[in-house]
Amino acid sequence: MTVVTTYLLPCLWAFLACLGFSIIFNMRGLSVWIACFGGALGWLVYLLCGSDIPAAFFAAIVIGVFSEFMARLRHCPVTGYVLISLLPLVPGGGIYRSMAFALAGDTSKFLSVLLNTLGIAAALAVGSMVSSSLFRTVYSSMQRAKEHRSQASRR
């Protein structure tokens, strides 16, 4: 029962949250389900990694690679997949708590929560950029090698 409550249900809630945002972003058809699965996959990686900032980084890398792969497979823009899949990981609660501590005058808790929130946001951004850059580099290298092999076989 603990596996269900620890991993399965939070991933289901992330999937449903992505479903709501995919409607807002006007996605259609199979793309909705792919983006929702990406959000659930990212949340699973986040839960498995443990610590907040490294977990956000690795989850963003997994989401980025998954989104790039699915975008190439379906000939769709990668932006919709990445944006919707990353939304469950956005640290909105940390922003709210840091502002609550700021308004209450608790400077030490405000700074602590704010820096953690900014760290999570930065990890998401850097993880997305790293995964996108690496995937595009590897993918273009593979495409060039494939073209080179096909040209060599024509000769």
Image (cartoon, grey):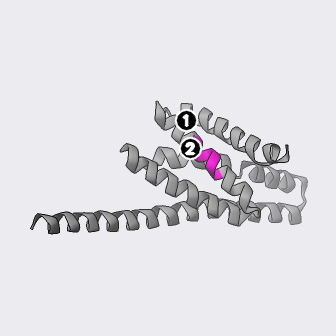
Q: Which residue is mark 1?
A: 22
Tell me what residue is drawn at x 52 percent, y 35 percent. 32
Q: Position of residue 112 (x, y in %)?
A: 82, 65
- On screen, residue 147 above or below 16: below
**Left or right: residue 54 compared with residue 100:** left
Q: Which residue is mark 2?
A: 84
Q: Residue at x 69, y 56 (%)?
A: 46
Q: What is the CA distance from the residue labelled 1 to the residue labelled 2?
A: 6 Å
Query: Does 45 appear above or below 140?
Result: above
Judge left or right: residue 150 versus residue 85.
left
Image coords of residue 143 (percent x, y):
30, 62
Element type where label 1 sits in the image: helix
Circles 1 and 2, Cβ within 8 Å, touching? The answer is yes
For the record, the magenta segment spans 37-42
Residue 41 magenta:
yes
Q: Amino acid at mark 1?
A: Ser
Count of all numbered marks drawn on residues in the image: 2
Amino acid at pointer 2:
Ile
In the rendered image, the quadrant that contains the C terminus is bottom left
Is residue 90 something that shows in the picture?
A: no
